[in-house]
Amino acid sequence: MTTLLLVRHGETDWNNERRWQGHADRPLNERGREQARVLAEELAARPVDAIYASDLRRARETAEILAARLGQAVRVDPRLREVDVGSWSGLAHGEIEASDPAGFRRWREGGKGWEGGESYEQMGERVVAAVLALAAEHPGETLVVVTHGGSIRACRAAAAGLGYGRSRASGIGSTENCAVVELRVAAGALTAA
Protein backbone atom coordinates (compact mmCIF):
# COMPACT_ATOMS: atom_id res chain seq x y z
CA MET A 1 0.00 0.00 0.00
CA THR A 2 1.31 3.46 -0.96
CA THR A 3 0.35 6.58 0.97
CA LEU A 4 -0.32 9.74 -1.01
CA LEU A 5 -0.20 13.12 0.69
CA LEU A 6 -1.94 15.29 -1.89
CA VAL A 7 -1.09 18.96 -1.33
CA ARG A 8 -2.82 21.86 -2.99
CA HIS A 9 -0.33 24.56 -3.97
CA GLY A 10 0.02 27.73 -1.90
CA GLU A 11 -1.96 30.87 -2.58
CA THR A 12 -1.48 33.03 -5.68
CA ASP A 13 -2.77 36.52 -6.34
CA TRP A 14 -5.29 35.00 -8.74
CA ASN A 15 -6.63 32.78 -5.93
CA ASN A 16 -7.24 35.95 -3.93
CA GLU A 17 -8.97 37.60 -6.87
CA ARG A 18 -11.03 34.46 -7.60
CA ARG A 19 -9.59 34.25 -11.10
CA TRP A 20 -9.59 30.98 -13.01
CA GLN A 21 -6.00 29.79 -13.36
CA GLY A 22 -6.21 26.44 -15.10
CA HIS A 23 -2.96 26.04 -17.02
CA ALA A 24 -1.91 29.69 -16.52
CA ASP A 25 1.53 29.64 -14.94
CA ARG A 26 1.07 31.97 -11.97
CA PRO A 27 3.60 32.24 -9.11
CA LEU A 28 2.85 32.01 -5.42
CA ASN A 29 2.32 35.25 -3.55
CA GLU A 30 4.05 35.86 -0.22
CA ARG A 31 1.15 34.36 1.73
CA GLY A 32 1.40 31.23 -0.44
CA ARG A 33 5.10 30.94 0.30
CA GLU A 34 4.42 31.26 4.02
CA GLN A 35 1.68 28.61 3.79
CA ALA A 36 4.23 26.28 2.17
CA ARG A 37 6.83 26.99 4.87
CA VAL A 38 4.29 26.21 7.61
CA LEU A 39 3.27 23.00 5.87
CA ALA A 40 6.93 21.99 5.44
CA GLU A 41 7.37 22.18 9.23
CA GLU A 42 4.22 20.09 9.76
CA LEU A 43 5.38 17.43 7.28
CA ALA A 44 8.89 17.29 8.74
CA ALA A 45 7.65 14.83 11.39
CA ARG A 46 6.46 12.36 8.73
CA PRO A 47 8.61 10.02 6.67
CA VAL A 48 8.44 11.07 3.02
CA ASP A 49 10.04 8.97 0.30
CA ALA A 50 9.50 11.22 -2.72
CA ILE A 51 7.99 14.55 -3.73
CA TYR A 52 6.19 15.05 -7.02
CA ALA A 53 4.68 18.26 -8.40
CA SER A 54 2.68 19.56 -11.29
CA ASP A 55 4.88 21.46 -13.71
CA LEU A 56 2.91 24.68 -13.17
CA ARG A 57 4.92 27.26 -11.25
CA ARG A 58 2.59 27.58 -8.25
CA ALA A 59 2.82 23.83 -7.57
CA ARG A 60 6.55 23.57 -8.33
CA GLU A 61 7.34 26.49 -6.04
CA THR A 62 5.28 24.98 -3.23
CA ALA A 63 7.02 21.62 -3.72
CA GLU A 64 10.47 23.24 -3.72
CA ILE A 65 9.77 24.86 -0.35
CA LEU A 66 8.62 21.52 1.06
CA ALA A 67 11.55 19.66 -0.50
CA ALA A 68 14.12 22.04 1.00
CA ARG A 69 12.83 21.26 4.51
CA LEU A 70 12.28 17.53 3.90
CA GLY A 71 15.63 16.89 2.23
CA GLN A 72 14.10 15.62 -1.00
CA ALA A 73 14.30 16.49 -4.68
CA VAL A 74 11.21 17.56 -6.60
CA ARG A 75 10.14 15.40 -9.51
CA VAL A 76 7.95 17.32 -11.96
CA ASP A 77 5.08 15.64 -13.78
CA PRO A 78 2.84 17.64 -16.17
CA ARG A 79 0.06 15.04 -15.85
CA LEU A 80 -0.66 16.51 -12.39
CA ARG A 81 -1.80 19.86 -13.85
CA GLU A 82 -5.08 21.54 -13.05
CA VAL A 83 -7.95 21.36 -15.55
CA ASP A 84 -7.37 23.45 -18.67
CA VAL A 85 -10.12 26.09 -18.45
CA GLY A 86 -9.62 27.34 -22.01
CA SER A 87 -11.38 30.65 -22.62
CA TRP A 88 -11.91 31.30 -18.91
CA SER A 89 -8.21 31.46 -17.99
CA GLY A 90 -7.46 34.68 -16.12
CA LEU A 91 -11.10 35.72 -15.76
CA ALA A 92 -12.82 36.35 -12.42
CA HIS A 93 -16.07 34.62 -11.54
CA GLY A 94 -18.05 37.87 -11.88
CA GLU A 95 -16.55 38.60 -15.30
CA ILE A 96 -17.54 35.17 -16.55
CA GLU A 97 -21.05 35.39 -15.12
CA ALA A 98 -21.53 38.73 -16.93
CA SER A 99 -19.89 37.83 -20.25
CA ASP A 100 -20.82 34.15 -20.58
CA PRO A 101 -23.99 33.51 -18.53
CA ALA A 102 -24.85 30.30 -20.41
CA GLY A 103 -21.37 28.87 -19.85
CA PHE A 104 -21.40 29.95 -16.21
CA ARG A 105 -24.77 28.23 -15.76
CA ARG A 106 -23.44 25.01 -17.39
CA TRP A 107 -20.47 25.09 -15.00
CA ARG A 108 -22.70 25.66 -11.94
CA GLU A 109 -24.80 22.66 -13.05
CA GLY A 110 -21.67 20.48 -13.10
CA GLY A 111 -20.60 20.69 -16.73
CA LYS A 112 -17.88 22.36 -18.76
CA GLY A 113 -18.65 26.05 -19.15
CA TRP A 114 -15.61 27.30 -21.05
CA GLU A 115 -14.66 27.03 -24.71
CA GLY A 116 -11.57 24.98 -25.54
CA GLY A 117 -9.49 23.43 -22.80
CA GLU A 118 -10.63 20.13 -21.34
CA SER A 119 -13.51 18.77 -19.32
CA TYR A 120 -13.28 17.89 -15.65
CA GLU A 121 -13.66 14.24 -16.64
CA GLN A 122 -10.68 14.44 -19.02
CA MET A 123 -8.57 16.09 -16.33
CA GLY A 124 -9.69 13.51 -13.77
CA GLU A 125 -8.70 10.59 -16.01
CA ARG A 126 -5.29 12.17 -16.60
CA VAL A 127 -4.57 12.94 -12.95
CA VAL A 128 -5.85 9.67 -11.49
CA ALA A 129 -3.84 7.68 -14.03
CA ALA A 130 -0.76 9.72 -13.07
CA VAL A 131 -1.06 9.19 -9.31
CA LEU A 132 -1.73 5.47 -9.78
CA ALA A 133 1.38 5.21 -11.97
CA LEU A 134 3.46 7.10 -9.39
CA ALA A 135 2.18 4.83 -6.62
CA ALA A 136 3.10 1.76 -8.69
CA GLU A 137 6.67 3.10 -8.88
CA HIS A 138 6.76 3.50 -5.08
CA PRO A 139 5.03 0.49 -3.49
CA GLY A 140 4.76 0.79 0.29
CA GLU A 141 6.17 4.32 0.33
CA THR A 142 4.81 7.74 1.24
CA LEU A 143 4.64 10.33 -1.54
CA VAL A 144 3.95 14.04 -1.35
CA VAL A 145 2.14 15.10 -4.53
CA VAL A 146 1.82 18.87 -4.93
CA THR A 147 -0.97 19.62 -7.33
CA HIS A 148 -4.18 21.65 -7.70
CA GLY A 149 -7.69 21.83 -6.29
CA GLY A 150 -9.36 20.18 -9.27
CA SER A 151 -6.74 17.45 -9.38
CA ILE A 152 -7.25 16.65 -5.71
CA ARG A 153 -11.03 16.60 -6.14
CA ALA A 154 -10.59 14.09 -9.00
CA CYS A 155 -8.50 11.81 -6.76
CA ARG A 156 -10.97 12.10 -3.88
CA ALA A 157 -13.82 11.30 -6.26
CA ALA A 158 -11.99 8.19 -7.54
CA ALA A 159 -11.31 7.07 -3.96
CA ALA A 160 -15.03 7.47 -3.19
CA GLY A 161 -16.03 5.56 -6.32
CA LEU A 162 -17.60 8.63 -7.92
CA GLY A 163 -17.16 10.32 -11.25
CA TYR A 164 -15.97 13.91 -11.13
CA GLY A 165 -19.40 15.35 -11.96
CA ARG A 166 -21.08 13.34 -9.22
CA SER A 167 -18.35 14.36 -6.76
CA ARG A 168 -19.25 18.03 -7.17
CA ALA A 169 -22.87 17.27 -6.28
CA SER A 170 -21.92 14.89 -3.43
CA GLY A 171 -20.35 17.48 -1.18
CA ILE A 172 -16.69 16.70 -1.87
CA GLY A 173 -15.63 20.29 -1.50
CA SER A 174 -12.67 22.31 -2.54
CA THR A 175 -9.31 22.00 -0.85
CA GLU A 176 -7.75 25.09 0.75
CA ASN A 177 -4.32 26.29 -0.34
CA CYS A 178 -1.56 24.13 1.19
CA ALA A 179 -4.07 21.71 2.72
CA VAL A 180 -3.20 18.00 2.68
CA VAL A 181 -5.55 15.21 1.62
CA GLU A 182 -4.28 11.76 2.52
CA LEU A 183 -5.26 8.83 0.31
CA ARG A 184 -3.91 5.34 -0.20
CA VAL A 185 -3.30 3.20 -3.25
CA ALA A 186 -3.87 -0.51 -2.75
CA ALA A 187 -4.27 -3.12 -5.48
CA GLY A 188 -4.07 -0.40 -8.13
CA ALA A 189 -6.98 1.64 -6.74
CA LEU A 190 -7.30 4.86 -4.77
CA THR A 191 -8.90 4.53 -1.34
CA ALA A 192 -9.54 6.83 1.59
CA ALA A 193 -6.86 6.85 4.27
Image (tube, rainbow, N blue to C red):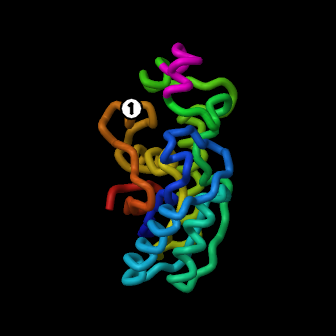
**Up-down: is 150 above or below 114?**
below
Q: Dot 1 surroundings within 10 Å: few (below 14), some, or many (20 or more)?
A: few
* Residue assigned mark 1: 166
Magenta highlight on residue 193: no
The front one of 66 and 136 is 66
The amino acid on which the numbered mark 1 sits, given as a three-letter code, is: Arg
Residue 185 place in picture, x, y as percent? 43, 61
Quarter of the image for residue 62 reads bottom right
User: With 40 as the anchor, is 61 left or right in this view?
Assistant: right
Residue 25 place in picture, x, y as percent? 68, 51
The front one of 174 and 101 is 101
The front one of 153 and 95 is 95
**Up-down: is 122 above or below 61?**
above
Residue at image point 44% right, 46% down: 153
**Up-down: is 93 above or below 49?**
above
- Regarding residue 160, the answer to whether it shows in the image is yes
Residue 83 place in picture, x, y as percent? 59, 41
Q: Where does the magenta region start and end?
A: 94-104
Magenta highlight on residue 101: yes
* Image quadrant occupied by the C terminus: bottom left
Residue at image point 39% right, 38% down: 162
Residue at image point 61% right, 42% down: 22
* Image quadrant occupied by the N terminus: bottom left
